[in-house]
Amino acid sequence: MSSASRPTTWLVTGSSRGIGFELVRQLVASSDNLVVAACRTPDKATALKGLKASAKGTLHIVQMDVSDFDSIRASAKQLEPILGEIGLDYLINNAAVASRDLPFALDPEELLQLMRTNVAGPAVVSQVCLPFLEKSVKKIILHISSTAGSLGSTSWIGAGYTSYSMSKAALNMLTLKQKAERPDLTLITLCPGPVKTDMNTENGQLEPEESVAGILKVITSVTAEDSGKFFSHDGKTIPW
Ligand SMILES: NC(=O)c1ccc[n+]([C@@H]2O[C@H](COP(=O)([O-])OP(=O)(O)OC[C@H]3O[C@@H](n4cnc5c(N)ncnc54)[C@H](OP(=O)(O)O)[C@@H]3O)[C@@H](O)[C@H]2O)c1
């Protein structure tokens, strides 16, 4: 990137490991990108901090627990000097937690915790990032969802992962509501596929590298007309 050109700016939540980490790793490999890697416990994010040594782009690590709304709001002070002038092109709400619970055995407190982290968290992160998105060129929010939250997909529905599926269906609705309120933004929800991460040790099929390469291809190709769509990492659309 020449010093005169503006970098493309990104914020990724849940960047300590899994898909979030791989997103940051691939993004900072390009000198065109400035990446804010938000993570819950930066002190413990050894691999993430290690990316600084080889990064061609700019990497900022910011503390953010998406289940702690005060923590999200407090991060605005750290974001202001980084994104205040340049704005935020891409917000990727990636952080989430899963549970394998069954509907007639679910713990309502666990359901509420998943809704807090997987739905309310992305909503508050979006609110905090809105002023930075408004200043940017792209103005794109990507919510990392799951086919588990698809009401229309027949391939996935089973009794397990009840709270998780409910949270991702709610996240998908948040996407549509955000689009309705702010047609000037581009709002996308996306399933990364079955990825070999800590969240999916049993059924993961894709390496994080492959899923994330697809995600980045999708998100950098979307246009305003794609706002409100539910994509897969390979660019196909998923039924709501
Ligand atoms: N893997 C799959 O097959 C798959 C399939 C469909 C959708 N997804 C979605 O893809 C996204 C990434 O999942 P993954 O497979 O990479 O999961 P993962 O390996 O379990 O990683 C989850 C990430 O989210 C972070 N996180 C969790 N709770 C957080 C909180 N309260 N505040 C901040 N960060 C928090 C974790 O940070 P800590 O290290 O601090 O815990 C970690 O960095 C999620 O939205 C998930 O639902 C994954």
Image (cartoon, grey):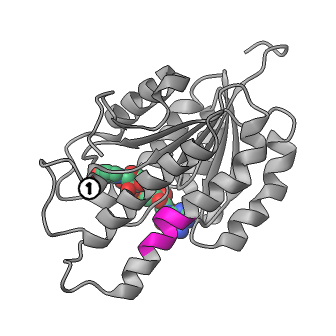
* Front residue (pair 172, 5): 172
* Left-right relation of 66 to 199: right
Overall secondary structure of the magenta section: helix
Corner quadrant of residue 56:
top right
The residue shown at (64%, 61%) is 124
Q: Residue 165 placed where, x, y %?
A: 30, 63
Neighbour tally class for label 1: few under 14, some 14-19, many 20 plus, Cα within 10 Å: many
- Location of residue 138 by image quarter: top right
On the question of residue 17 being in view, the answer is: no
Which quarter of the rendered picture does the N terminus lie within? top right
The residue lying furthest to the front in this view is 180
The residue indicated by pointer 1 is 148
Counting from the top left corner in percent of width and height, residue 163 is at 32, 72
* Left or right: 101 in relation to 119: left
Height in image: 162 above or below 220? below
Ligand 1 quarter of the rendering? bottom left
Residue 77 is a magenta residue: no
Against 40, is 59 above or below? Answer: above
Residue 12 seen anywhere in this rendered image of the structure: yes
**Residue at image x 48%, y 20%?**
221
Hey, what amino acid is under mark 1?
Ala
Q: In the rendered view, does 74 fall on the left or right side of 36? A: right
Who's the residue at 26% across and 41% down the image? 239
Relative height, residue 127 to residue 56 (above, below): below
Q: Nearer the viewer, residue 77 or 34?
A: 77
**What are the residue bounds of the magenta stretch?**
114-120
**Residue labelled 1 has its Cβ within 8 Å of some atom of ligand 1:** yes
Q: Position of residue 145 (x, y in %)?
A: 39, 50
| Residue found at x 17% / y 59% | 202
Exactly how many numbered labels are in the figure? 1
**Secondary element type, mark 1:** helix
115 drawn magenta: yes
